[in-house]
Image (tube, helix red, strand yellow):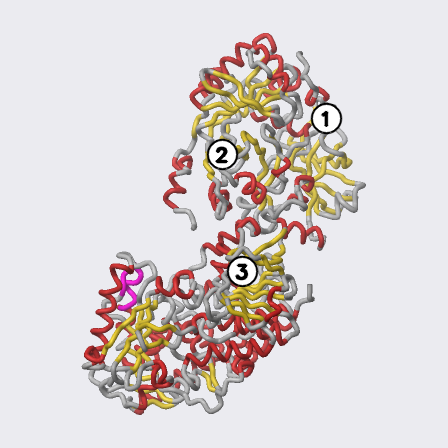
Amino acid sequence: MMPDLATRLAQQKHITTPRLETPFHPRIAALSETNDWYTWAGYKAPHSVFDEELEYFAIRSMAALFDISPMVKYRIAGPDAERYLNRLTVRNVAKLAAGRVHYTAWCDDHGHVLDDGTLFQLSADTFRLCCQERHLPWLLDSAIGFDVGIEEETTEIAGVALQGPTSFAVLSKAGFEGIERLKPFQLADFAHDGGTVTISRTGFTGDLGYELFVPAAQALSLWDRLWTAGRLHGIRAIGYAALNRARIEAGFIVSNADFMTAETTLRADRARMPDEIGLDWLVDMEKVNFNGRKAILEARRNQTLKHVLVGLEIEGNIPADGAIVYHRRKQEAGLVTAAIWSPLAKRNIAIASLARPYGTRLTEDFWVEIYAMRELQYQKMMKRARIVPRPFIKLDRRAANPPGLF
Amino acid sequence: MTSSDPARNISGAFDAIVIGGGHNGMTAATVLAKGGRKVLLLEAAERTGGAMRGYEFHSGYRAAALAHIVNRLDPEVAELLGLETRTTEALPTIALSLDGKHAVLRGAYGETIDGVSTAEAKAFAAMRKKLIFQAGILKRFLKRRPPEIGNVRMNDLGAFAGAGLSLLTRGREEGRDFLRMLLMNVADVADEYLSDDRLKGLVAFDATLGIHLGPRSPTSLLGLYYRLTGEANGRTGMQYVPKGGMGALAPAFEKVARSAGVTTRTGESVTRILADRGAANGVVLASGEQLSAPVIVSAAHPKATFLALCDTADLDTGFVRAVGNIRSKGNVAKLDLALDRLPSFTGVSTDDLRGRLVIARSITHVEDAFNPAKYGEFSPDPVMEITIPSLADPTLAPSKGATLSALVEFAPYDLKCGWDNGKPAFEKIILDKLEHYAPGLSQNIVASNLMTPADMEMHYNLPGGHWHHGELQADQLLVNRPVNAAAGYATPLSGLYLASAGSHPGGGISGLPGLLAAKRILSETRP
């Protein structure tokens, strides 16, 4: 009934290797001028490749290649796969068609978010779940009573995001025939190097863009294919710093940055319900039972939700990362979890977590206290902040059909 | 299929469906019916009774029930049943000794003792007084729904205050002693008070019977406390066999259920508890028939209830994980002997044969018997308690014949060599042991039947063959019985309630889980 421990450990070999390299590593290492690496889910990943600033502009005006291989990937297959995922995740998987992708989240019994991620329906009974954290024990325990197989395929499958206005042109040039038919959140298989590459029109930038998944052995040939095709379209390899700017502009949240995942929190009050991190729109109370349903329903009914996630526009141009948010300059109301000066919106923007009723009943007169370190001295600023809707930018080219051939 | 009510086929006409016709299921059904609910009781076997159900183990010889003595039937349940316990006599416990010089506990758990020195009798009386006082404090929590952590009600506070007061009135010393002893092992406590190995062996045996602990395992005293929360006729620790024998219990429960208006269907096994978006609303029978009711009460084992009867899709992962981790592997075997005459135990009077005979020579004997169980082996020198059920109910055996029932530990559910291989060897060991205390017994044996935990699992639909429906240990008690999210009889599925021994306070024929579950249901607004 309960799965065997030894088998589980054998399925989580990553634990024994402190820092892995992704299948694309040889190419990125060769391009790296900054030699600026960080650890992403046990993998060596570039924080920047040549210049954080220019890498950001590669996303917004050319085409950017971002290695997403460290993203944790699970293959979920079997007759009960849909039923299983409908119980696991908060969104209605019955509404997800084959060949489509949706953004979703999953919770524990208390309705606290374990992680968010994207769910790819590869075929009628086969799915791929992509996320930040590893969840195999939870996914396996969730499978008790279901006819479904769950395998982690993080190391086996390499992934790369191709984002930016010329990304469609790059793929066309690379010879992926029929790529023009892919609509946002749609996926399809294409021939590559004697095998197939799964391309979805998805991304984490709010821009026109694609994500490509390929068996690790074909990773380098895929990179080379894109790189060659992209030469005249300004293709660049980028690191996380640039992507992070783009995702903040797009209003996307990152687990363990904008919210703590329930299984990694040490403090009981740090876990968050979907409604507390802006994911209430994912939760489908009408569908069949799912993990956390009762808890979320009760929290809504009893109005015990404690937090709310908001977008802020802050006066000035100093990013307010980590700043405390005040109501009427005095009362502490929350914390900025991500902030940048947006080059595209030309505004100083931020994502913040506020303690209700701030952000729900009380929506005016917010201030952020920014401590800017200037040559070993803090410059303290109290700046006015306004709650604004997310995303902070909206690009028509993201959803244009067919996509623009820039 | 049999039925006691022709109106049974009106589907949806019931306010509550109770799954499982054991004593807890029948108690819950009866209390609900008396509370004005229309109740349907479903029992998979051809007869109700659960572990009180007897069985024929040899032509002409029957075992009255799985349980062979009553020591904790709740007075409220006894009254509900109309059981005549006032005139019931407290049966003695004979702590057997190889030399035939036994210690005999008379009255309610040894109010007086024969066969020990005056000093030892005094020491036992002091220990008995101490333990009964402390068990009394715990008892306050046994007959009420466990408090809900984070949502403590006023009357929970009352119970805490009551427990605190009863300690305070006895002085600081008692309070300190209670906290000191609560999680101790029974061996250290016995060593503290007693010097007679027979008495020490007996309390060590009583503390660990049906629990996967040895007397030297931490917290093993809890088992003895649990035993001493039982009462009969207002006398704590008393044990008895009802008039007509243990076999009279099941019919008594059936009768009171019937007269309360409970509709009973036997031979109907439930295969699925139906639910929709967090609310249980019916059951599916093996025949495919669907029955709906706003309240479903499961007196089946919690693991069976949630992992077999419920669709796990209706439950949350963490809950399923917790239920899957309930420790519920039995380690007691039951031996039934068909005898051609009443056995004779050296040094035991015929009158005392009506009591309980315990083979547990010392604490070390019990501990040594437990040790192999940790590694999936049975005891080469087991400990056991013996009764002669045919004395209370002569119909169990042909005239002049007799039956003997022994609960033997330790017999781990997961026997390393498998029970098919191990059973004959273990049975031989038990018979050899018995022969030491009752010479000549082997010549009187007409037939024998050993029921291992694996057999109990099969015959009584008891996962793990554990009669408590889950280990009765500190981490699976009170607010964590069977698991925290279902500790108050209500479960994460609204409309589904638990009423088995797997719920608070635990196993043994007490009727309390069933009684408390029904009270909880009656206390809630009717759907």
Can the viewer see residue B127? yes
Q: Nearer the viewer, residue A102 or A116?
A: A102
Residue range of the region highlighted in magenta in the rendering: B369-378
Q: Residue flagged by tag 2: what amino acid is it?
A: Arg
> Circle 1 is placed at which residue position?
A393
The residue under label 2 is A75
Residue A5: % across, % down: 39, 46
For numbered disc 1, what is the local secondary structure? loop
The quadrant of the picture occupied by the C terminus of chain B is bottom right
* Pair 2/3: label in front: 2
Q: Is residue A233 toward the left or the right of residue B222 in the image?
A: right
Q: Residue placed farthest to the right in the image?
A: A364
Q: Mark 2 against mark 1, which lies toward the viewer?
A: 2
The answer for how far apart the CA atoms under marks 2 and 1 are is 33 Å
Say which residue label 3 marks.
B484
Q: Give percent across and percent down for residue A250.
A: 68, 28
Q: Distance between the residues labelled 2 and 3?
A: 32 Å
**Residue B382 sits in quarter:** bottom left
